[in-house]
Image (tube, rainbow, N blue to C red):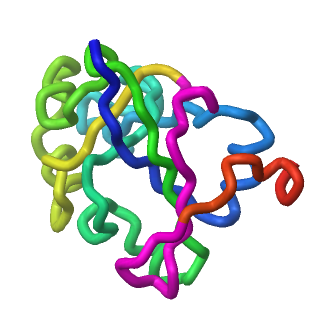
Amino acid sequence: MSPRSLYHYTTELHLPLIVAAGFLRVTESNIGSPVPGVEPSGEHYGPDVVWLTNSDEVDGLGLETTVTLGLGLFRFVVAVPDNEVHHWPTWNKRFAMNDAWRASLERDQRPESWWLIERPIPRREWVAIQRQVDQGDEWVPMSMNLSASYG
């Protein structure tokens, strides 16, 4: 299948770690509730994933704390095979996610723009790395060879 272009947002704190590793790492999928008794619960209940989005706007992606703290926002544009990418609203239902926990996670967000993949994304699937300018709508390209700065 043809590759789908999506974004993975990150902070200036994580950028050098990603570049040094040469791939976007998987992380918690948030399928399990953090509240014992609100089942299913517990970390890593569902598969670990790389969170992606088709949104070029930061609002509604769960990045409010990052933006508020001014941590420096970056995004990776990635091209991953369509057959490996899952749309959050459909994917989370496979794991019987608790409805109340899902509603809490999605509250005031745009979950229709959330996508994920159940594996790391290697450098060969990175299309671009971009830096947000002054917490605005402008994104500027960065060199794909950041090893001199961050290696």
Residue drawn at the location 66% of the way across and 66% of the way down: 12
Q: Does 32 appear above or below 140?
A: above
Counting from the top left corner in percent of width and height, residue 57 is at 29, 67
Outermost residue on the bottom side: it is: 134
For the point 29% across and 19% down, the residue is 2
- Identify which residue, 36 or 8, lies in the foreground: 8
Placement of 55 over or under 97, stated as above or below: below
Query: What residue is at 16 percent from the left and 61 percent from the top?
Result: 107
Q: Quadrant of residue 142?
A: bottom right
Q: Is residue 110 magenta?
A: no
Residue 79, quarter of picture:
top left
- The percent coordinates of residue 6 (x first, y second) are 35, 42
- Give the residue displayed 38% in from the left and 73% down from the top: 64
Q: Answer above or below: position of 91 versus 72.
A: above
Question: As rendered, which of 76 and 69 lies closer to the eye?
Answer: 76
**Would residue 24 be found to the left or right of residue 4 on screen?**
right
* Image: magenta residue range: 120-140
Expressed as whole percent of the image width and height from the top left, the position of residue 106 reads 19, 54
In the rendered image, residue 134 lying in the magenta stretch gets the answer: yes
Tell me where residue 62 appears, x and y as whole percent: 34, 62
Circle count:
0
Q: From the viewer's side, name the closer residue of 102 and 109.
A: 109
Classify residue 149 by image quadrant.
bottom right
- Which quadrant is the N terminus positioned in? top left
Is residue 63 placed above or below 113 in the rendered structure?
Answer: below
